[in-house]
Amino acid sequence: SRVPDKPSSLHVRPLINNIVVSWTPPDNQNIVVRGYAIGYGIGSPHAETIRVDYKQRYYTIENLGK
C-alpha cells in the first residue's frame, strides 16, 4: 500500500492562545486516507503529535499561551 499525498491545501489561523489548522484531502483520491497527524512544538522532532480521524478537516491546538 502507498502513503497518501499531503493535503492539497493547508491553512493556519493564529488566535490569542490557540491555533486553528484546517486542510483539504489530497488531490489523489485513489489512495485511502485513514487519518491525519498534526505535529507541533518547539524543536525537532515535534514535541506533540495529534492524530485525527480521516473525516476531520480542522483541529484547534489549544492553551499555547501557557
Image (spheres, grey):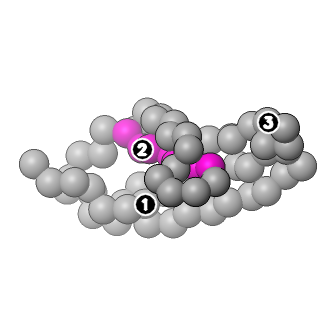
The number of numbered discs placed on residues in the rendered structure image is 3
Q: Quadrant of the C terminus?
A: top right
C-alpha gap between disc 1 and disc 3: 25 Å
| Residue type at the position of mark 3 | Asn
Tell me the element at label 3: loop
Tell me the element at label 1: loop
Residue denoted by label 2 = 36
**In the figure, residue 55 lies in which quadrant?**
top left
Please report the residue visible at 44 percent of the width from the left and 66 percent of the height from the top: 8
Which one is nearer the viewer's eye here, 49 or 5?
49
Task: Classify 36 as above or below 28.
Answer: above
Give the image location of residue 50, x and y in percent. 51, 37
Please report the residue visible at 41 percent of the width from the left and 55 percent of the height from the top: 25
| Residue type at the position of mark 2 | Tyr
Give the image location of residue 61, x and y in percent. 69, 41
Please report the residue visible at 37 percent of the width from the left and 39 percent of the height from the top: 35
- The stretch in magenta equals 35-41
Residue at far right of view: 16
Q: Earlier in the sequence, mark 2 or mark 3?
A: 2
In the image, is 66 to the left or to the right of 30? right
Which one is nearer the viewer's eye here, 26 or 6?
6
What is the crowding at mark 3: few (fewer than 14 residues within 10 Å), some, or many (at least 20)? few
Residue denoted by label 3 = 63
In the image, is 40 to the left or to the right of 6? right
Q: Earlier in the sequence, mark 1 or mark 3?
A: 1
Give the image location of residue 4, x and y in percent. 26, 55
